[in-house]
Image: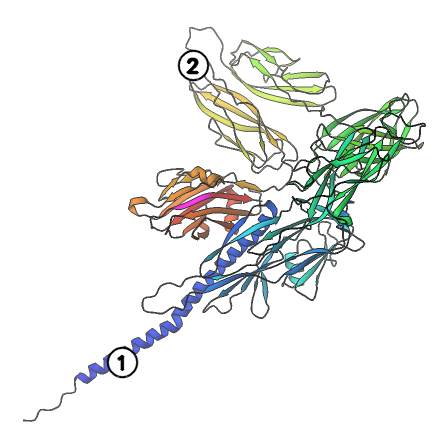
Amino acid sequence: MRLRGDDRAVTVQVGAVLLLGILVISLSIFQTTVVPNENEQVEFQHNQVVQEDMQSFRSAVTRAGGVGLTQSVAVRLGTQYPERALFINPPPPTGTLQTGTNSDVEIQNARALDDETSDYWDGASQGFTTTSVRYSPSYNVYQNAPTTVYEGSVLYNEFDGGTTIAQSQQSVVDGRTISLVAIDGELSRSQLGAVAVDVRPKSVSQRTVTVEGDGDPVTVLVPTSLDASVWQNTLLADEYDDPSTPDDPDKYVAEVNPTGGNAVEIVFEPGYQYNLNLAKVGVGTGVDEPEPAYATTVSGDEQVVPEGTTRQFVVEVRDQFNNPLSGVELNSPTITNSAQAGNDSVAFAGASETNSDGQVVVEYTAPDDVDGEQTAEVEVGFGSIDEEKVTVSLRVEDSNDSGSGGNGGSNINPGDPGSVTQKGAVIADTNQVLVTLENTGDERRIIDEVRLNFYYEDSQGQAGTSPPTTAEFNNGEATLNIRGAFKDVFEIVEGDNENSLSLRFFTDQNRNGEYDVQEGDFFVFTVLYDNDDAATYFVAPTDTDEPINADFSYSPSSPASSETISFDATSTTDDDTDSRSYSWEFGDGTTATGAQPSHTYSSAGTYAVNLTVEDSGGEFDTYSRLIEVTAGGGGGGGGNTGPTANAGPNTGVDEGQTVELDGTGSSDPDGSISSYSWTITDDNGASVSLRDANTATPVFDASSANVGSDTPVTVELTVEDNDGATSSDTVQVTVRDTGGSNSPQTLYPDQFDDQNGGDAAIPPNNPQGIMSAFSQMQTDNNQYAQLQPGGSQNKEMSIGVATNGVDTSATTYELEVRHGYENGAKAATLQIVDSSGTVLQSQSLTPTGSTATTSISLNTQATNSVQNNGQLYVVYTKSNDNKNLYVYYQRLVAS
């Protein structure tokens, strides 16, 4: 029998083949479209991250050139794609970080105001070489990724075809200050992971040189690939004084011109003085050390040397960036013009090699006897051309008329009957000296001209001093340059009368920086009278004109009604010898006078006692205290004796810092102190606050203070005992002026939160892991705090730290974290969060095999949070690898 054929299985086979084809096609489509799209997104996100790293590099260049500390920045050159089980990734993308070709920075037509410094800054073109730093990615998919370049203080992106987009602001021009930082060295790194770049200071900006145009306006050429229009309309928009609009007195850039090369020309408005701040940093290898460029005098030029005495002057050697250079050997000083041939001498006062401040001290000894006034000139330097040496002029004076046969010349410190004598000189304000001249004759004397010959600092030659260069005479009547020319004035000294002359001293020609006059300083000035007579005065001001500081005490310390209270104001201080008057208001409608009155209150209560002390010169001060008066009477016991508040001794704090107050000396003889309350009753305009004001030891916070002079702040402590009685006391905290505005504030964290408790009020809400040795994070001492994941439970780490008292008026915030890892650890992430724990900014702390410093410029969200609250919250997170993170320090720089 023949069987019929059966073809039913053919359909199943065909279907399987079709399904396999569809699967292969789908996988191919996923491999060729989805995988590249996802990888392109990975590459794009990496490019955003590496641009943040380059912003950190830009900040590191500025800090290294400004503060003199090496800055380490991690730049993540490449990235990794996500792992795929069935699909294939291309090789991980890498990147290259390298320096560019050297370019020239030029400063043209700039002449220094100081005579010796102008030998170098003489109006001719001066400059130095610098280089750019470029990051170039090698992505597989993201084809239009930019090259990110730092050049000319600006970070910008450079695209194919020459398009450039600025990613930061410029820092070259700020009003009349010109700041330039040169980068030197060779750097070329190409890899997948992060590379640590050390930015090393080579010439730290320590000196500011004031210049003006030498006929033509001051001009600066800045290397850049950005168009001049971008500089003018975007980067310099706040500095450019557009000629098509009304003149803006706060803008000093007159023109921004292209040069035909990769540079722009910035032309400044004529008729103004400008301050040069220059620095140099190094990256990579092949960094050249700065060479000596010129010598200048710091102090002692044009000083008066009485016959037979020795005086010192200080010479400083600087590099081409105007910064002092140590280790430079000077040639032996020589007298090129003798006050009396063979009878004067000159020698180094110590080493002939410049010290750490770039300075050498030279001593000149005058002849024992000269006729009238003679001029000696001393030459010293490290080379033979003009800018490599200085010539110091010294005026040798006949101090006792031993060699003078007539009345010619200038009369020094006149004291003869009928002359105009110096009666005294006092420091009236931080930078003000009042010189009192007394006419001992009958006839009026008129001062026609005045010259400021010389100023001697008591601290001359020491590091950190900024000598005065200019003085304002009698509230703007004339501006005198020290060692400058005579200036016309009109001052009358009536017969048998006095006239006080005011001189306010400044550290710069523009009279922006006040010089702090100290006892021990002295200066010399000469006046010319209308009858052609001259007189020279040696002035050594004394700091005797101190303000009144009213103060009083009372006894008993816990008075009762109907009890006599003795008040004593003899603790009031006033260095003047003037008589004083005392006026009292006892807070119950009664008053009294005198230094030690008595008073009795008729009923219990809290009374504000005010004391006003005034001297015969019209100066006065008022001091107030609250007095708690308890109910009097002679009952059979059971009454409460009130507490005694003790706010601690008067103290002081530098602006930008904090200090702890101490009320633990408060007491209660028959009970205990139940509460403390601190308030600021008089801040005198200082921006200060209190933290933990309801504790015995609050924190007085002057981190936002920027005072023009030392400023007293009155803080009152009120304590209450367990019976409800109160007592008050005050303490004075002096906020000390540290000598500058907008000084950067550096803060370390002061709270942490881990799974064991810590400060639970700060983020995160559910901390995991343990913080050990937190105090090591609060200082840069090469010791570390240890951040452990969740231990045996193998939990992820989430540990918070907080920095309080941050300056809310600052405009930029830089966070620096030096960190390391236990071997084999995965990277931790630093999160900047708000008080509720919302992430505002994050940064990976990349393991490098050794310690590294990560610098983070706070973004807009994080900056706004800090400015609104004065607090910075940071959370360290890490996966569950049971490996420790080590944090050597975390610090925030607010500026």
Magenta-span inclusion, residue 629: no
- The span picked out in magenta is 882-888
Q: Residue furthest front?
A: 342
Q: Is residue 692 above or below residue 132?
A: above
Place residue 268 in its image quadrant: bottom right
Q: Amino acid at mark 2?
A: Asp
What residue is disc 2 on? 670
Near mark 1 (Cα within 10 A), the count class, few <14, some 14-19 or many ≥20, is few
Q: Between residues 135 and 491, which one lies in front from this camera angle?
A: 135
Closest to the camera, between mark 2 and mark 1, is: 1
> Is residue 884 one of those drawn in magenta?
yes
Left or right: residue 417 compared with residue 736? right
Residue found at x 91% / y 32% = 409
Q: Which mark is residue 18?
A: 1
Is 90 positioned to the left or the right of 345 in the image? Answer: left
Q: Is residue 600 visible?
A: yes
